[in-house]
Amino acid sequence: MMSLTDYAGVAGLIAATAVAIWMLRNHRTTAPTARPARHRGSPALRLPRPTHPERASSRR
């Protein structure tokens, strides 16, 4: 005979599986529309250009 905690554990596993499947299906449908926005580039996320002191010292 299964106890109440066993039933809760089985129900939790089923719920977690259902949520994972729903998230994967939802990600596939929204990914093509979300991709172009990533390549626009926001100024806050741009990294500073690396400086090359060896190149600057060789210029005379």
Image (cartoon, rainbow, N blue to C red):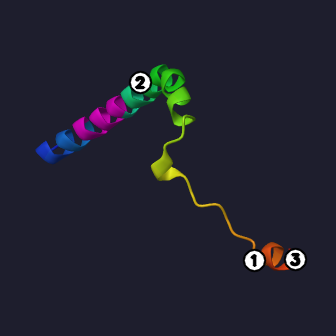
**Taking 46 as reference, is 12 above or below it?**
above
Q: Which residue is mark 1?
A: 53
Q: Residue at x 81, y 80 (%)?
A: 57
In terms of depth relative to the viewer, which is nearer, 58 or 49?
A: 58
Magenta stretch, main secondary structure, is: helix
Outermost front residue: 60
User: Does residue 58 appear left or right of residue 16 in this picture?
Assistant: right
Q: Is residue 18 magenta?
A: yes
Q: Is residue 33 magenta?
A: no
Residue at position x 33%, y 32% from top?
Answer: 19
- Which of discs 1 and 2 lies nearer the camera? The answer is 1
Residue neighbourhood size for the residue with mark 3, other residues' Cα within 10 Å, grouped as few (<14), some (14–19), many (≥20): few
Q: Which dot marks residue 26?
A: 2
Tell me the tag on residue 60. Answer: 3
Q: Which circle, 3 or 1, is nearer the viewer?
A: 3
Q: Position of residue 43 (x, y in %)?
A: 49, 47
Of callouts 3 and 2, the N-terminal one = 2
Q: Which residues are magenta?
A: 11-19
Do the residues bearing badges 1 and 2 touch, measured as CB atoms within 8 Å? no
Secondary structure of the residue carrying numbered label 1 = helix
Q: Earlier in the sequence, mark 3 or mark 1?
A: 1
For the C terminus, give its image quadrant: bottom right
Side of 25 relative to 49 (left or right) = left
Residue 31 visible in the displayed image: yes
Residue type of the residue flagged with mark 2: Asn
Residue 15 percent location from the top left of the image: 27, 33
Q: Position of residue 20 (x, y in %)?
A: 39, 34
